[in-house]
Amino acid sequence: MSLLKAKISILFFSTFACSILPVIVTAQTITYTPSVAIPGQPAIESQFLGSVPAGKPTGSVLHLSLKEALEKGLRQNLGMLVQEESVRAERGKKWKELSSLLPNLVTKTSANIERDNLAAKGLTLPGLPQMIGPYGYYDARVFLTQTVFDLNALDRTRAADKSLEAAVHSYGDARELVVAAVGNAYLQALAGESRVETARAQLDTAQTLFENAVQMHRAGVTPGIDELRARVELQTRRQQLIAAGNEFEKQKLIIARIIGLPTGQDLELTDKAPYSVVGAISVEQGLERAYQSRQDLKSATARVTAAELSLDAATAKYYPSLAVEANYGALGTDPGKLKDTYTVSGVLSIPLFQGGSVRGEELQAEAALRRSRDELADLQAQIEYEIRTALLDLKAGAEQVDVARSSVELAELTLSQARERFAAGVSDNLEVVQAQESVAAAHEAYISGLYAHNLAKLELARALGVAEKRVEDYLGGK
């Protein structure tokens, strides 16, 4: 008798394992790793993932649209603020270099008491005292120094001007990166919100199916294994809802971190994931637009020019320079009886030997120039790569969404028929559970496809250099 019970138990658990294993394997919890890296493009620097928080939490839910998130990010994002200070620093360098070409005026006023040893200076004439003084005098004077010709100073000033231009363009590119980072984070959060809504709907369906399975088991219509399968499916859906909800909350924290919301501010996304087709463009058209709009390309070009001028400045140290030095003031022993005095000098400086320092500067400038040219060439290739990648992703994303939509409809129809067959007693609920898994997978494919398609549009706007101006148009399909 005990042997018969053992055989029955083994048969039961074998049947249970064979029936429930597909459910466990296909119903694994999906985890989503938050990221703001845009596929096909270099990873966004960490400073663009931070911000300088402004204000304090309101204590209420902040309703946040994509447009508002972009506006806040463009005010508070750390990467943009850092680049803004870089522009200010380059402007200071330009003024510093320019000062060597502008007039330099200094005024000095002094009251002096002197005692001098004439003999120490070789003045030992008969009748001339060895020591004179002490005596006093007053001197009030203005000193002027003006460069007339200095090719080194001129080239350094021109190089500083180009460096400032490069910094200004880098600031524009930083704004593009902020738009890319905020837009990607917002799209990820929209996808996370969709996953929560889908998981909640699937949980409701699983709850209904579980209750039906319990009732049919109690009525003796179906075996206990059907109830167990329904219970496992219900628990799996609860687990997925918890995981999706947790990821969604973290994705909202990422948005808050990027755009500078105060810590602890609760927010709600007001926009929904859009789906619209962007008008197709060719690679050649994309490159033409990018070469006109990309701020990082303009910055790299300006840096090449600055490096060329820096090399010219280093070479110019071999050449003579001409300056004017002058002073004008009043000199006398009595403050009330000062006499006007002045000096005007033309100073011609001709380098003869400088110990190899100029050659060293030339070598450094040549290396910097080659590096900046290589970086420009690499960036041009990178731009073409980004445009080609964005266009491929855009096409694939649209096709993925279309297929996923059809898959959702087919999966839901399959689930409906499986439920009817189970209710009619034609089949067990293994078919229903498998149909539920198909519905879940189809919805996940649709959410992922929609995110990929919108991200491709954002990626294309960034690749063309128009993200800040036209990100909403591109996401809207214009």
Image: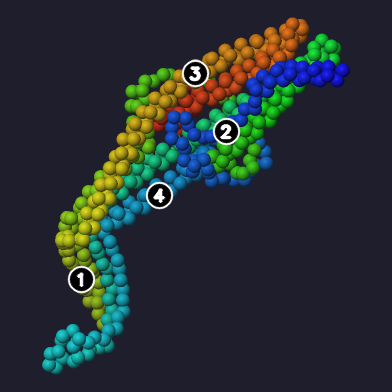
Q: Is residue 325 left or right of residue 62?
A: left
Distance from the alpha carbon under mark 3 to that under mark 1: 81 Å
> Measured along the vertical axis of the image, is residue 295 above or below residue 152?
above
| Front residue (pair 471, 114) | 471
Pair 1/4: label in front: 4
Disc nearer the start of the sequence (2/3): 2
- Do the numbered discs 1 and 4 sit on residues whose CB atoms are within 8 Å? no
Q: From where the camera sits, is residue 134 visible?
A: yes
Using a 10 Å C-alpha cutoff, classify the residue at mark 4 as few (fewer than 14 neighbours), some (14 to 19) or many (20 or more).
Answer: some
The residue indicated by pointer 4 is 88
Distance from the alpha carbon under mark 3 to that under mark 4: 43 Å
Distance from the alpha carbon under mark 2 to that under mark 4: 37 Å
The image shows residue 15 at horizontal and vertical percentages of: 74, 16
The residue indicated by pointer 2 is 33
> Measured along the vertical axis of the image, is residue 411 above or below residue 48?
above
Pair 3/4: label in front: 3
Disc nearer the start of the sequence (2/1): 2
Q: Is residue 402 left or right of residue 439?
A: left
* Kind of residue indicated by mark 3: Ala
- Give SS at disc 1: strand
The residue indicated by pointer 1 is 342
The residue indicated by pointer 3 is 398
* Kind of residue indicated by mark 2: Thr
State the image quarter where residue 13 is shown. top right
- Give SS at disc 3: helix
Q: Quadrant of the N terminus?
A: top right
Distance from the alpha carbon under mark 2 to that under mark 3: 23 Å
